[in-house]
Amino acid sequence: MKTLVYALLVLLVAAASPLNAQSPDGPWIGSINVAGTELKIMVTFQTKGDSLSATIDIPQQMAIGLPLRNVSWRPPKTHFELPAGPGLAVFDGRIAKDSVNGDFTQAGFAGTFRLERGKDVRTAPPEAAVPPPYREEEIAFKSGEFNVAGTLTVPPGGGKHPAVILITGSGAHNRDEELLGFRPFRIIADHLTRHGIAVLRWDDRGIGSSGGNKSLSTTADHAQDVLAGVKFLRARPDINPEAIGLLGHSEGGLIAPIVAGLSRDIAFIVLMAGPAVTGERLVCFQIETQMRGAKAGEEEIRKALSEQHRVFACVRADTGWDGLALMFKKEAASGYSAMPAERRKAITDSASFVNVRGAAMMGGVRVPWLKYFIDCDPVPALEKVSSPVLALFGELDMQVPVSLNRAPMEAALARSRTKDWKVEIVPKANHLFIRAVTGLPSEYAGLEKVFVPGFLDLVTEWITKRVPVLTGGAGERGN
């Protein structure tokens, strides 16, 4: 079943020893095959002195920077372990120059895994060795009972600068919204600050240096974090309190209009792939699109959508969980039966396999965020917006698609209180505003980690036409 949350938290990778001639430091890109599912992944290794570390990104699960433990790199073998919900994941691989092939086990699951050393085109451009022509400050502020930690970049020169708050999408993100080596928020912050605009970005709840627990929060809670960020900026002597705007990506594009409706202090809004339909419609579209991309049959797609609607019904009513648990267990059993014989032989306890996978599916949907998200309609918040709005969609976005969101976005903004709004489609761009081929998340790992040409200039020019930028305060300008 292709549900919203893949049940199994996958694992992988290897790591490095500084004593080895072949250092694995850097990104390795590949996939894991488990229970009939292929997940694209990137593993990043880092050597510090005699210590080895590695992390794993799984974009299809929106899992970023998961730390691995007991990492070793002793050619021709490598080993690592990942603590995860269903149980400890153990990986053993075989090294062959610039590739790794191996097997892993986790709570009765067995699968295969492959990695290849990342090529330059697949990683973000290296950062300049020369310090940037602006001030970069580590900051913290209170949101409710916990601290939010982040970075504020401020253009050179005195006076009060306009500012932008960057709002991450769904999933757990650091302040750079890092995914598979791409750090879009770091790039946006650098570009805007070089053009005279201060930028505030922070680690999500429970991520990096921020407190709280994102797994227990909802979209509405995240809006409160943004309001706290606005309050923090308004109190600073180097920020113009009348020129503070929001830039939200994906779910962040849902949060930004909510915040604008709660505060009169928002000067403008930029929506990067912000949805204009409910979470339920988005999820169902994603399931259908990705299944068609995988060449699934019409009956299989119909069944998956029917089961997804059953999940939503249980989540809304907070009842029927026993029946849902049975459905997940049957799906897990079906997945086990569909495995090749050699893979089933590797699973020593089939009953445990089915029980653990079914429980993991249940844990993935029984969360406050999903209950809020599936029925959250962006339109009422969009209609209340009175500040200028720039809404951007990637032409090839398969997560917040143009075909589903453009018309309701335009209709909502036409009914809104603002007379200054624009909806623009960015050619050849995916959900990350990277140049894409199909737009499917499965290709993210292999794409060049840069924004499509002209994207940063488009955003910057639109903002600077709406807020005053201090003359001579922009420093060295560049991309």
Image (tube, grey):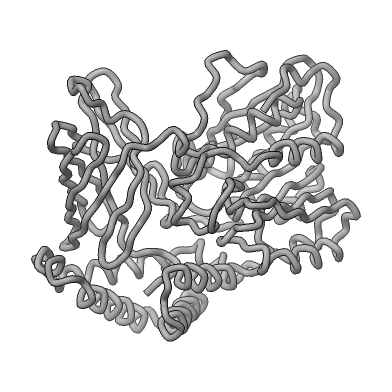
Q: Above or below — where is 29 with respect to 196? A: below
Instruction: Judge left or right: residue 217 versus residue 424.
Output: left
Q: Above or below — where is 363 with respect to 40? A: below
Instruction: Judge left or right: residue 198 versus residue 94.
Output: right
> Does residue 319 show up?
no
Identify the residue at horizontal 30%, vertical 77% (top origin). Answer: 331
Identify the residue at horizontal 29%, vertical 24% (top origin). Answer: 47
Instruction: Judge left or right: residue 74 versus residue 286.
Output: left
Q: Above or below — where is 343 with respect to 472? A: below
Across and down, in percent, residue 121 comes to 47, 36
Image quadrant where one finds the C terminus: top right
> Does residue 162 show up?
yes
Across and down, in percent, residue 30 comes to 33, 48
Identify the residue at horizontal 47%, vertical 74% (top origin). Answer: 315
Among the 4 quarters of the image, the one containing residue 220: bottom right
Across and down, in percent, residue 470 comes to 83, 22
Identify the residue at horizontal 29%, vertical 54% (top origin). Answer: 32
Across and down, in percent, residue 453 comes to 67, 39
Image quadrant where one finds the N terminus: bottom left
